[in-house]
Image: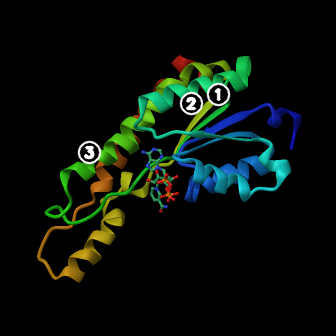
Amino acid sequence: MTANQAEKSILITGASTGIGRASAITLLEAGFQVFACVRNQRAAGALRASLPAAVADRLSTLELDVTSPEQIRAAVTAVEQAVGDRGLWGLFNNAGIAVNGPLECVPIDALRRQLEINVIGQVAVTQAFLPLLCKARGRILTTGSIAGFSGTAAGLGAVILTFWTGWVVDHFSWTSIAQRTLKMYEELLHEQGRAFTVG
Ligand SMILES: NC(=O)c1ccc[n+]([C@@H]2O[C@H](COP(=O)([O-])OP(=O)(O)OC[C@H]3O[C@@H](n4cnc5c(N)ncnc54)[C@H](OP(=O)(O)O)[C@@H]3O)[C@@H](O)[C@H]2O)c1
C-alpha cells in the first residue's frame, strides 16, 4: 500500500456478492478506503466478517438500493462527511440484475425493473456523487455486459429454456436492452466527462 492509496476512497454499489464483493475485497487489500454499498445489515455484517481486522478498518458499509432517492441522498451525505475536501476518487457502478427469457413469457415489469436498476439507478448514483468525484478528479467505472455488444450470448439461457419447455417461441435477450442502453450512456459519459473534470 502507498500513502497515496490510503487517502483514496472508492464507492462500490452492489458489493454484497459477486463482482462487487470481490472488487471491494481486492481494493481494500490494495490499501484503498472502500465504501461498500449493500442492501441490508446482514450483507454488511457478512462482508465485514470475511475480512481480516487490518483490512476491515478501511471498510465502510452503506445501505444503498440504487432505486431509492432517499438512500442515495443519505449515502452522499455519509461519504461527504467521511472524505471532506479529499472527495471521492472512484465510483464503481456495479449493482445490477439480469433479465432473460422468451419474449412471450417475461413480464414487462421485469424489464422496467431492470432498466430502473441497471440504467436509471447508475445514472442517479453517478449524478449524486459527481460533486465529490470532481473534487478528487475521480473516475467512474461501470460493470457492463457482453450483452451490450451481442444479444446472442445473453440469450443463451433463453434458448435453453425454450428447448426445455418445448415451446416454439422466440428467445429474446432482455438484458441486451438494458446493457446496450447502459453502453450508450457510458460512451456519452466518457465523451463528456472532461467537462466535469472527472479523470
Ligand atoms: N457475472 C456475469 O457473468 C455478468 C455478466 C454480465 C453483466 N454482469 C453485471 O455485473 C454486475 C455484477 O454482477 P454479478 O455477477 O456480480 O451479480 P450478483 O452477484 O448478483 O451481484 C449483483 C449485486 O447487485 C446488487 N443489487 C441488485 N439490485 C440492486 C438494487 N436495486 N440496488 C442496489 N444493489 C442491487 C445485489 O445486491 P443483493 O445481494 O442485495 O441482491 C448484488 O450485490 C451486474 O451489474 C451485472 O448485470 C455480470
Where disc 1 sits, the SS reads: helix
Q: What residue type is labelled 3?
A: Arg
- Decide: few, some or many residues near mark 3? Use Cα within 10 Å; few <14, some 14-19, many ≥20: few
- Decide: few, some or many residues near mark 1? Use Cα within 10 Å; few <14, some 14-19, many ≥20: many
Residue at the location (54% across, 18% down)?
196
Q: Is residue 92 left or right of residue 127?
A: right
Q: Earlier in the sequence, mark 3 or mark 2?
A: 2
Residue at the location (81% across, 56% down)?
52
**Residue 32, x across and y down, in percent:** 76, 40
Question: Which quadrant would residue 75 be assigned to in this image?
Answer: top right
Question: 81 above or below 10?
Answer: above
**Residue 90, x across and y down, in percent:** 64, 34
Along the line of sight, the residue nearer the viewer: 166 or 147: 166
Which circle, 3 or 2, is nearer the viewer? 2
| Distance from Cα at disc 1 to Cα at disc 3 | 29 Å
Location of mark 2 (residue): 75
Point out the image quarter for the N terminus: top right
Q: Earlier in the sequence, mark 1 or mark 3?
A: 1
| Distance from Cα at disc 3 to Cα at disc 2 | 24 Å
* Label annotation for residue 79: 1
Where disc 2 sits, the SS reads: helix
Q: What residue type is labelled 2?
A: Ala
Residue at the location (71% across, 26% down)?
82
Q: Which residue lies furthest to the front in this view?
A: 41
Q: In this view, does 179 lie to the left or right of 11?
A: left
Q: Do the residues labelled 2 and 1 touch (CB within 8 Å)?
A: yes
* Label annotation for residue 112: 3
Is residue 189 shown to the viewer in this render?
Answer: no
**Residue 98, x across and y down, in percent:** 37, 57
Is residue 66 shown to the viewer in this render?
Answer: yes
